[in-house]
């Protein structure tokens, strides 16, 4: 199977599982425990359980946001922007991704993912239709692998899921109060113990790949640095993570400098998310493409 932009973009969506890194924090002054800054924002939390609980409550009230992302995976630079609904009963996403100048549109609705590809990519895959459908109940191995990855990615793009991972396997290294994009925020630096969090990270990955990853990581003490910026309503405005050491441990090329650094920004919390499936006559099922590609 060729490594097309489609597969790379799918991998990028999966990387949303553990949101981002690489942005430089704005300087700020820490507030004494229990005090409030002049802006009225409460003092930072002292442990990850309190941090995760408060932010989950804030996100549950708003349920949706705009999102933008920059990342580097395997030497490829990727950007994405779109709308996401984090309601567990009605997960939805509409996103445009750009990989090395090639653009793809992604929609997630009713647990089914649709990708709109450039004409050259569609031709390479043996279809003249612009949209590819990845169904969660498809039998072919390519659809199974991508569907599991996309399910995990969409669920854990919800910042509350990311905070769950941090609360279970992370610790707060430091915190301070500063500003981000003109808003007062609490800024946290945390680190995640991969050995403690690996089961959650790989929850929806196919069993064979999950077992292989665990074997590669066995006995390795990998800590992933992350940063979180929360506004006065405990809503995430930015989350970052550096997965570089994890990717090296999983066999990523050493030459891929900067690989694994991801930055996700959230804005316009509570914005409506309206996502519809593409017209049926413009869609090819991934199972048909898998046959063409020998999957």
Image: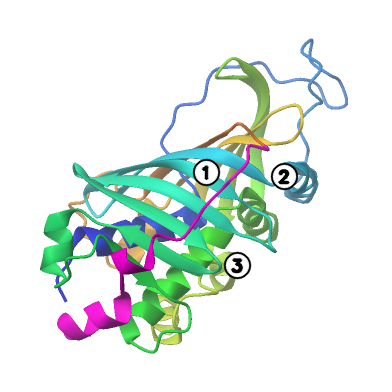
Among the two numbered marks 2 and 1 on one chain, the one whose residue lies closer to the N terminus = 2
Q: Which residue, given by chain and number where applicable, does mark 1 sit on?
A: 83
**Residue 128 location, x and y as percent?**
17, 66
SS state under label 1: strand
The crowding category of the residue bearing disc 1, from other C-alpha atoms within 10 Å (few below 14, some 14 to 19, many at least 20), is many
Residue 193 seen anywhere in this rendered image of the structure: no
Q: Say whether residue 103 is left or right of residue 222.
A: left
Residue at (75%, 48%) from the top-left corner? 60
- The answer to whether marks 3 and 2 mark residues whose Cβ atoms lie closer than 8 Å is no
Q: Quadrant of the C terminus?
A: bottom left
Determine the CA span between mark 3 and mark 2.
25 Å
Question: Can I make out residue 102 in this image?
Answer: yes
Secondary-structure class at tag 2: helix
User: In the drawing, does residue 168 fall left or right of residue 132?
Assistant: right
Q: Quadrant of residue 74?
A: bottom left
On screen, 89 above or below 284? above
Quarter of the image with the N terminus is bottom left
**Residue 59: mark in rendering:** 2
Magenta residues (range): 270-295
Q: Which residue is mark 3?
A: 196
Residue 118 horizontal/vertical position (percent): 19, 53
């Amino acid at each position: 199977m060729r490594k097309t932009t489609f597969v790379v973009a799918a991998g990028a969506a999966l990387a949303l599982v553990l949101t981002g890194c690489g942005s430089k924090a704005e300087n700020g002054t820490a507030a004494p425990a229990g005090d409030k800054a002049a802006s009225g924002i409460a003092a930072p939390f002292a442990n990850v359980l309190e941090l995760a609980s408060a932010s989950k409550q804030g996100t549950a009230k708003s349920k949706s946001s705009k999102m933008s992302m920059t990342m580097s995976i395997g030497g490829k630079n990727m950007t994405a922007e779109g709308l996401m609904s984090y309601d567990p009963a009605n997960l939805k996403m509409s996103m445009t991704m750009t990989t090395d100048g090639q653009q793809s549109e992604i929609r997630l609705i009713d647990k089914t993912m649709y990708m709109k590809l450039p004409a050259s990519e569609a031709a390479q895959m043996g279809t003249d239709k612009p949209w590819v459908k990845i169904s969660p109940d498809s039998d072919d191995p390519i659809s199974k692998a991508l569907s599991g990855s996309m399910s995990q990615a969409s669920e854990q793009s919800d910042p509350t899921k990311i905070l769950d991972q941090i609360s279970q396997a992370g610790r707060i290294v430091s915190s301070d109060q500063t500003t981000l994009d003109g808003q007062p925020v609490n800024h946290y630096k945390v680190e995640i113990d991969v050995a403690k969090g690996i089961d959650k990270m790989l929850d929806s990955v196919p069993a064979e790949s999950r077992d292989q990853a665990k074997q590669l990581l066995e006995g390795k003490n990998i800590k992933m640095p992350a940063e979180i910026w929360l506004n006065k309503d405990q809503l995430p405005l930015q989350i970052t993570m550096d997965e570089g050491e994890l990717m090296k441990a999983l066999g990523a090329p050493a030459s891929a400098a900067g690989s694994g650094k991801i930055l996700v920004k959230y804005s316009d919390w509570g914005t409506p998310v309206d996502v519809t499936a593409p017209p049926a006559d413009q869609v090819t099922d991934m199972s048909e493409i898998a046959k063409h590609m020998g999957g």
